[in-house]
Image (spheres, grey):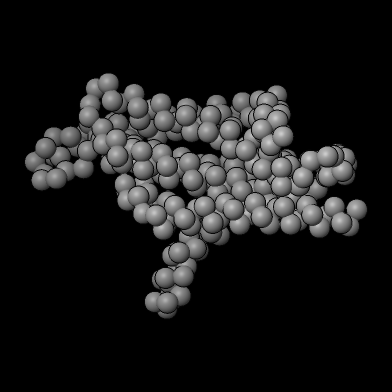
């Protein structure tokens, strides 16, 4: 049943013109960033040959591409997740959904996986750009894999947070704005240098950007992966609890 809900949600996204517009805009922005990084790399290539352990194409082209992609998708993911549950509430179909012979856990996981399938499709399109460089140069596939893993995990985290915020309101616009505000806070939470050493450590651990940047540098630390898995599972559990509360109240 989870996969049926996920497939239905995935197909419904492509029935909306907004999804196609988002895909097109993201590809244009990232293609511009990609070719700009290549141009910069060619301009400094002569200087790089004189340096010992000079950064390669993966560091100077692919990592910046993934970093730009994460920032762009931090703004875009709320638009994709805002309608998952809030639209059901707005259309008064949430009561029918909750009264169906399907558990709330299956509903939430199905909705989440449907969005995740769309995100994975987007990620596959993004990965074609760096992979195209392998035809003309050598890539650090370890760093490339770590970067793709980090990008997938952070997008999965964005989606989980967006799903929860969508369960709190019947207004998709409010859900999108709330999700963006929450993600931006968690992205920039460690930006202040005025905190104590202990407080700074806590803020660094809570920061989405801190864990993502470690993976982007090719450091596959299990602590970063566990953080994202806890983040995702935490917001999914909160969404399930929220819908259970709504079912009892109705």
Residue 23 lies, in percent from the top left, at: 56, 29
Residue 184 or 40: which is nearer the viewer?
A: 184
Which residue is most to the right?
250
Q: Nearer the viewer, residue 58 or 233?
A: 233
Along the line of sight, which residue is nearer the eye, 170 or 37?
Answer: 170
Which residue shows up at 46% across the image and 70% down it? Answer: 202
The quarter of the picture where the N terminus appears is top right
Left or right: 86 as drawn, with respect to 13: right
Residue that sits furthest to the top in the current view:
135
Q: Position of residue 96 (x, y in %)?
A: 87, 40
Q: How many labels does the image show?
A: 0
- Residue 46, placed above or below residue 220: above
Q: In this view, does 160 lie to the left or right of 149?
A: right
Above or below residue 117? Residue 71 is below
Q: In which quarter of the image is residue 17?
A: top right
Q: Residue at x 10, y 45 (%)?
A: 52
Q: Which residue is drawn at 81% across and 58% down?
A: 245
* Camera sees residue 110: yes
Relative to 235, is 159 above or below?
above
Q: Where is residue 242 in the image (x, y as percent from the top left)?
A: 76, 56
Does residue 176 appear in the picture of this structure?
no
- Which residue corresponds to the image point at 70% horizontal and 30% vertical from the top-left? 4
Position of 106 relative to 164 (above/below)? above
């Amino acid at each position: 049943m989870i996969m049926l809900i996920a497939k239905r949600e995935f197909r419904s996204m492509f029935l909306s013109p907004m999804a196609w517009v988002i895909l097109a805009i993201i590809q244009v922005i990232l293609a511009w960033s990609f070719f700009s990084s290549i141009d910069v790399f060619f301009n400094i290539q002569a200087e790089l040959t004189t340096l010992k352990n000079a950064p390669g194409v993966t560091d100077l082209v692919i990592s910046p591409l993934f970093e730009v992609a994460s920032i762009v998708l931090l703004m875009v993911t709320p638009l994709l997740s805002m309608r998952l549950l809030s639209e059901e509430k707005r259309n008064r179909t949430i009561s029918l959904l909750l009264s169906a012979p399907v558990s709330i856990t299956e509903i939430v996981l199905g909705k989440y996986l449907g969005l995740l399938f769309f995100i994975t499709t987007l990620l596959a399109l993004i990965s074609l750009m760096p992979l195209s460089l392998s035809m003309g140069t050598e890539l650090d596939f370890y760093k490339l894999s770590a970067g793709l893993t980090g990008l997938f995990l952070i997008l999965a985290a964005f989606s989980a947070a967006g799903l929860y915020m969508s369960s709190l309101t019947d207004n998709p616009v409010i859900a999108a704005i709330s999700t963006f505000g929450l993600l931006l806070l968690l992205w920039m939470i460690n930006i202040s240098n005025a905190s104590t050493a202990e407080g700074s450590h806590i803020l660094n651990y809570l920061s989405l950007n801190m864990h993502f940047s470690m993976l982007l540098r090719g450091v596959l630390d299990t602590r970063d992966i566990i953080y994202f898995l806890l983040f995702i599972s935490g917001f999914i559990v909160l969404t399930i609890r929220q819908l259970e509360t709504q079912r009892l109240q109705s």
